[in-house]
Amino acid sequence: MAEEHVAATPEKAAAASKTFTWRAGEQALQYDATAETVECLARDGAKLGDMFCLSFVVPRNPNAPRPVTFCYNGGPGSSSVPIDFGGFGPRILAESPDLAHLSTPWPVVDNPHTPLPVTDLVFMDALGTGYSTVEKGKEAEVWCVDGDAKAFAAGIAAWLTAHGRWGSPVYLMGESYGTVRNAVLVRMLQEQGVGVAGVVMVSALFDWSQTLPGNVLYYAGLLPTYAACAQWFGRAGQGEDPDEFFERACRWAGEQLAPALLLGDAVAPERERELAGQMAELVGVSEQWLLERHLRVELEDFRQELLRDEGKVVGRLDMRHWTWLDQPVQLNGDHIAAEDPADDATNSACVAAFRAFLQELGYEGPSVYLDNNYEKVNKDWKFAHQAPGVLDTGMAPNVAYDLATAMRRAPRMRVCLIGGRYDAATPWWNVEQTLANLYLPTELKANIEGHLYGCGHMAYYDADTNAAMGAMLRDWYQK
């Protein structure tokens, strides 16, 4: 390991950089890790905030510039720690057995599946999360769909300038709400003269209306994920291949369930009972329970119902996880939604690994690191967004139109979609349904790759998925 290099930044924690060696089998790669903040300036020069970045850069050949990928999580209100130390950075949490809850601290190892051999990586914290700060009075300006994308566009431009990387191919990698950000950001960067070579969408959601209560697409989209969960726990699909069972559930959701939900009480009682029987066979709960809900199954209801006879509730971000049901006095819907065993299993271990790495790097940030700031950022977030070419501002945005516009402008730009069967936060069925309704020309559709894995929302926490996904991404970058 080389000696430490420190550069002071006025009115900020000093940037810190060290050189490390990544090893995987017989492979070895030297890289520089740098923790710093960059200034985010609006187009008129007004300061929006300071964005914290942790970058991993391989010394490069000036005649063959390496790609650089800007990475972030979602929320809104999440820092970039999970996507970094969870799965894509050069160091990650060691593999956990059988979906176990990790103790803290948890061993950290060189990540054999990181895309670092083919692209430099810059992990960025959204303003108001992690060590990123918002200028006083600018919160409403940046805690919204368009303002957030503007802040990231400014942060990316500042990083490219500070590191002399304007000649490098630029990629974006976002997870969850980070995919909403990606869709708006890639269009916005184009409008500011920054071309994007490719976009990686991990656990994507583009049409926010599908999350609203009572939306038919919400119920239909969750059905295949419920089925995958029921199969995992032995309540449905016994003896069937998981991929084939999931695909069968996807077809049934689109061809049988969605049309019936659109008809509402115009569906004959006999037909509703027939559908309830078919649905019960797929999702592992009783026909009567489904009839009482007229086939409209809320996520928090299903999480508590599937294993109720065992006194358990299943996860949301990854429905393979479970924990014990709370007492009846605690069964507030918001509480159940927030109490997610899939998140509990990994979050503290991931944050501890990140903080320990910053200590090793010599970065002396504040003692408080907002790994998530949902109670402030998410609570105050404004979802209004005017899609390109659309006259009205939608309160529940569909940013797929932004993505389609960006793809038409840059017909060589590629998009990689990654999703998980057990992800109930951003169901795979909804992504496919949204993109199918863009009616993209064949030439542009060929630039979109979809990869479904046997994982949850944080795809990288699944060891088998991380290995397959890592190999896939290295190939994808080099196409």
Image (cartoon, helix red, strand yellow):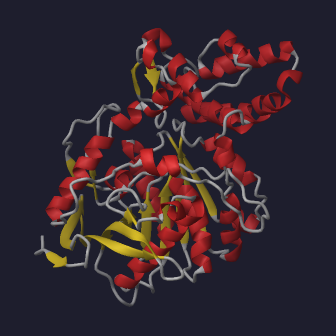
Could you tell me residue 35's position as x and y percent?
A: 26, 68
Residue furthest bottom as drawn: 63
In the image, residue 245 above or below residue 413 = above
Could you tell me residue 388's position as x and y percent?
A: 72, 68
In the image, residue 163 above or below residue 407 = below
Could you tell me residue 317's position as x and y percent?
A: 47, 37
Pick whichever, 11 or 7, lies toward us: 11
* Quarter assignment of residue 48: bottom left
Pick whichever, 385 or 6, lies toward us: 385
* Quarter assignment of residue 19: bottom left
Residue 176 in view here: no
Residue at 52% from the left image edge and 60% from the top image edge? 140
Could you tell me residue 119's position as x and y percent?
A: 40, 71
Residue at 60% from the left image edge and 58% from the top image edge? 449
Residue 90 in view here: yes
Left or right side of 78 for 406: right
In the image, residue 443 above or below residue 225 = below
Image quadrant containing the N terminus: bottom left
Left or right side of 478 for 360: left
In the image, residue 168 above or below residue 15 = below
Left or right side of 289 for 419: left
Residue at 28% from the left image edge and 80% from the top image edge? 59
Residue at 48% from the left image edge and 21% from the top image edge? 233
